[in-house]
Amino acid sequence: MVKKDQVMVVTIDGPAGAGKSTIAKKLAKVLGVSYLDTGAMYRALTLKAMREDVNMESEDDLIALAKRTTIDIESLDSGVKVLLDGEDVSQDIRTVEVTNNTFYVARAAGVRSIMVEWQREMGLRKSVVIEGRDVGTVVFPKATRKYYLDADVEERAKRRYDELIAKGEEVDLKDVLSDVKVRDEKDFTRKVGPLKKAKDAVVIDSTKMTIDEVVEEMKNRI
């Protein structure tokens, strides 16, 4: 447990399918702090852009959309509730369509600036475990503890495939693997907030580790 007078920020960066969300949720619960899913924030704005048929190629349109949007993340025992302008979109933001379009929102520098300010504000108010692509390098460069969670691309694709099948979606493993590889390329090469390891981050390869083993290792290092 973290003392009330101490504000602790733990960041977990890494590629898609490495287990960041699951690990971050469990670690936050073990530490007795809040969990902040940055990816859910980008997904929520992407969902709104799709609903309103906003031009994803126009950064100005996306910035204007972000400025008139309210996104809240509430920690629950079962995970998080994502509120988009007061509407619970926790399930709606996890579709393949939203996943494939989030890149457009995430690469927009103006949108990321707005998101970063929201995230920093949350991190200043209370202790959090936060996960994403650049939370240890850009959002919280002075975080209490930083982790970079990785896994083989085939394993990450299998995890994503199992997640989608469990939700009742009809997907092919080869297609999911292709999508993960494309997403990796975009994450590593985008001009704004690219995915990279922070110099002071502890690197953990979760390929052959259980969720509990990863959480235990992270907890022991804090």
Image (tube, helix red, strand yellow):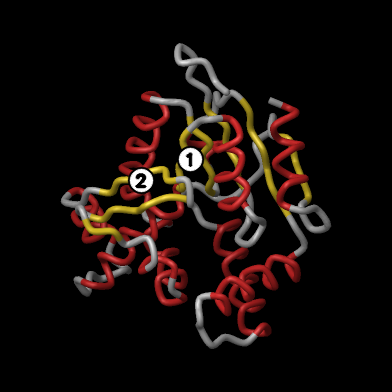
- Within 10 Å of disc 1 (Cα), the crowding (few <14, some 14-19, many 20+) is many
Q: Position of residue 41 (x, y in %)?
A: 37, 52
The tag earlier along the polypeptide, 1 or 2, is: 1
Q: Position of residue 159 (x, y in %)?
A: 67, 68
Mark 1 to mark 2 CA distance (whole Å) = 9 Å
Residue 131 quadrant: top right
Label 2 residue SS: strand
Which label is found at residue 185? Answer: none
Contact between labelled residues 2 and 1, with CB atoms less than 8 Å apart: yes
Q: Position of residue 42 (x, y in %)?
A: 38, 55
Q: Residue at x 56, y 26 (%)?
A: 143
Q: Is residue 96 left or right of residue 210?
A: left
Label 1 residue SS: strand
Vertical side of 101 occupied by 15: above or below: above
Total marks in image? 2
Q: Residue at x 53, y 48 (%)?
A: 132
Q: Residue at x 51, y 82 (%)?
A: 168
Which label is found at residue 35? Answer: 1
Q: Position of residue 56 (x, y in %)?
A: 31, 69
Amino acid type assigned to the residue bearing label 1 in the image: Tyr
Residue 125 quadrant: top left
Q: Which image quadrant: the C terminus?
A: top right
Residue 148 quadrant: top right
Q: Nearer the viewer, residue 122 or 111?
A: 122
Q: Which residue in the structure is indicated by mark 2?
A: 73
Q: Nearer the viewer, residue 189 or 112?
A: 112
